[in-house]
Amino acid sequence: MSKINKKDFLPYAKQSIDDDDIEAVISVLKSDFLTTGPVVTEFEDMFSEVLNVPHAVSCSSGSAALHLAYLSLDLGPGNYVVIPSVTFLATANMVLHTGAEIIFCDVDPKTGLASAETIREAIEFEGKRVSVITVVHMAGQIPDMQSISKLALELDVQVIEDACHALGSLDPSGDPVGRCSNSAATIFSLHPVKAIAGGEGGVITTRDAEIACSMRRIQNHGMIRQNFTDLNQALSENGQVNPWYYEMLNPGFNYRLSDIHAALAKQQLTKLKHFTEHRSSLVKRYDAIISTMPDDFRSFIRPSGRASCGEVAWHLYIVLIDFKGLGCDRFTVMQYLKSKGIGTQVHYLPLHMQPYYRKRYGKKYLPGAEDWYAQTLSLPLHVGMEYEDVDRVISVLSEALVKCR
Ligand SMILES: Cc1ncc(COP(=O)(O)O)c(C=O)c1O
């Protein structure tokens, strides 16, 4: 078998970097600030303007963003957070780092999204008083936030949106995800496979000035430089604030974003609309080809998505394939695609099935999440792709499904 040249390999996800991005980073390298400086502030301002939300706090990763959001809601030992089982590890792991515990809820096997019903079911099953519900915008889709926030109101709990997949998505009323119309805070990742790349980085948006202020403090060692609590120490003999003085209110972290990362993220943010439109045209191409395939094939493979979930900025193109019914296994299909130069991924092994969480919370059965996991396959979707790439992926996938039976 001929070897695939690395350059010809089509990965499932990839950043798109142009000369303007490179120039933006170079200009920071030539400036006075490498760590948090003016470009971070410019990036945060642009982010809050694009999402039409009062506060955007940047940080070092999407995981750090989750940690900051959870801590700013005062999560700690004795608290419980509901999390959909189908998500990336960080959504849950960061809860444990606050000392709180997790209740995993089920998802719709067709979309991978949690709903008010699956959340309520999980809470009632566990019989715990819950403090926070975290929803995950799987692949860019938006769960039914209205009914989830109605449930949150009824139970008097806060909602956090993990929108690492959904920068650029619009909710059914046309508001950008991150506007926090139905949540206390929304978090985003700037990891290179996401909608825009910062190398590493994260952002939390909120409408609540107190939450934003608390996150900024925790992000930087719990440090404040005004509104001091101990004026005896803060003031010099002439009554002026000592110029070196700062106070620590609680033990925070170094979760700061650097100007180097912010420069890349800011430049990428100017292209968000273009990126979203290009991905969307690729998704339409995938959908169109799949819809013309023979019925016996189409019944096994269908595009993801919900008609009523607003305008999705697709982060992943996921197909659900009845591998078991077809008599072929996913590993063999993925290997075949790889041998033809096509990368795929699985999003995700449900967290309640992770050995760590099975040990911590016991064996659980969440049928929707397990069905989703059995069938899910993420095909390549990124800005560097053209229609021919989509056509090739589907053609090779069809071959694989026939050959692997
Ligand atoms: C749903 C979700 N949550 C959280 C994260 C964590 O983001 P980061 O990798 O920037 O820490 C990711 C990133 O993969 C993610 O996909």
Image (tube, rainbow, N blue to C red):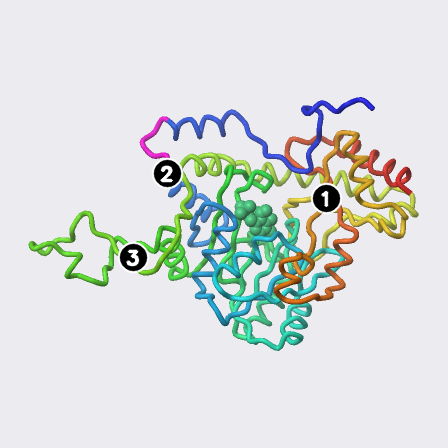
**Quadrant assignment, res 37:** top left
Farthest residue in the left direction?
238
Disc 2: which residue? 35
The boundaries of the magenta stretch are: 30-38
Question: Of tags 3 and 1, which is closer to the observer?
Answer: 3
Rounded to the nearest angstrom, the CA distance separating label 2 from label 1 is 35 Å
Q: Where is residue 133? Give x, y as percent.
A: 57, 65
Regarding mark 3 in the picture, which secondary structure is present there?
Answer: strand
Q: How many residues crowd around disc 1 within 10 Å: few (fewer than 14), some, or many (20 or more)?
A: some
Check residue 65 in the rendering and tell me which mark sits there, or answer none: none
Can you say whether 295 is above or below 382 in the image?
A: below
Q: Where is residue 62? Give x, y as percent.
A: 52, 49
Check residue 378 in the rendering and tell me which mark sits there, or answer none: 1
Rounded to the nearest angstrom, the CA distance separating label 3 from label 2 is 21 Å
Residue 278 visible here: no
**Mark 3 or mark 2: whose residue is earlier in sequence:** 2
Q: Where is residue 286? Give x, y as percent.
A: 77, 40
Disc 3: which residue? 248
Residue 88 part of the magenta segment: no
Regarding mark 2 in the picture, which secondary structure is present there?
Answer: loop
Q: Label 1 amino acid? A: Ser
Residue at 82% across / 49% down in the picture? Answer: 321
Residue at 54% across / 27% down in the picture? Answer: 18
Residue 33 part of the magenta segment: yes
Q: Label 2 amino acid? A: Thr
Q: Quadrant of the N terminus?
A: top right
Regarding mark 1 in the picture, which secondary structure is present there?
Answer: strand
